[in-house]
Amino acid sequence: MASDPKVHVFEDVSKHNQTKDCWLIISGKVYDVTAFMEDHPGGDEVLLSATGKDATNDFEDVGHSDSAREMMEKYYIGEIDASTVPQKRKYIPPQQAPYNPDKTPDFLIKILQFLVPLLILGLAFAVRHFTKKE
């Protein structure tokens, strides 16, 4: 690791989100993992999905080995200015229209399941009535 680490701003780090230029923030440290993209066991998509955010939880959830943690040292390029990292956003579910069971296709099917047998029964009585010889 460098003796006097460079301090990076989150906005600058988040711009490095391509296969040919990929930086990650893990535990307050910035890593340039561009050279490791093709060698990563999980593929480059895993690394790319961790860009533009604090990837500490993503990294820790996988349970990397000690050798993987040691390997990180050669990709270390500095620290992140913690005051520039956005706070974790709370999930807000999208607004949805209230559920109206009368407007679903299931409702139409239920109506047809009721009306079609009645229609067939009515037709049967009509045919019987008009074709009956007295």
Image (cartoon, helix red, strand yellow):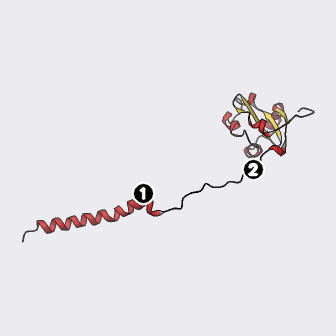
Depicted 93 relative to depicted 67: above or below: below
- Residue displayed at 38% across by 59% down: 109
Position of residue 108 relative to residue 36, above or below, is below
In front of the other: 72 or 5 = 5
What type is the residue that disc 1 sits on? Answer: Pro
Q: Quadrant of residue 31?
A: top right
Determine the CA span between mark 2 and mark 1.
Answer: 39 Å
Q: Secondary structure at mark 2?
A: loop
In the rendered view, does 35 fall on the left or right side of 130?
A: right
Taking the spot 77% from the left edge, 44% from the top edge, the residue there is 56
Query: Residue 6: percent from the left, percent from the top?
Result: 88, 34
Q: Residues within 10 Å of mark 1 (few under 14, many from 20)?
A: few
Residue 43, can we see it? no
Name the residue at the right extreme.
3
Residue 2 appearing in the image = yes
Q: Is residue 8 left or right of residue 116?
A: right
The residue sitting at 36% across, 63% down in the picture is 111
Q: Which mark is residue 88?
A: 2
- Residue beneath disc 1: 105
Mark 2 or mark 1: name the one nearer the start of the chain.
Answer: 2
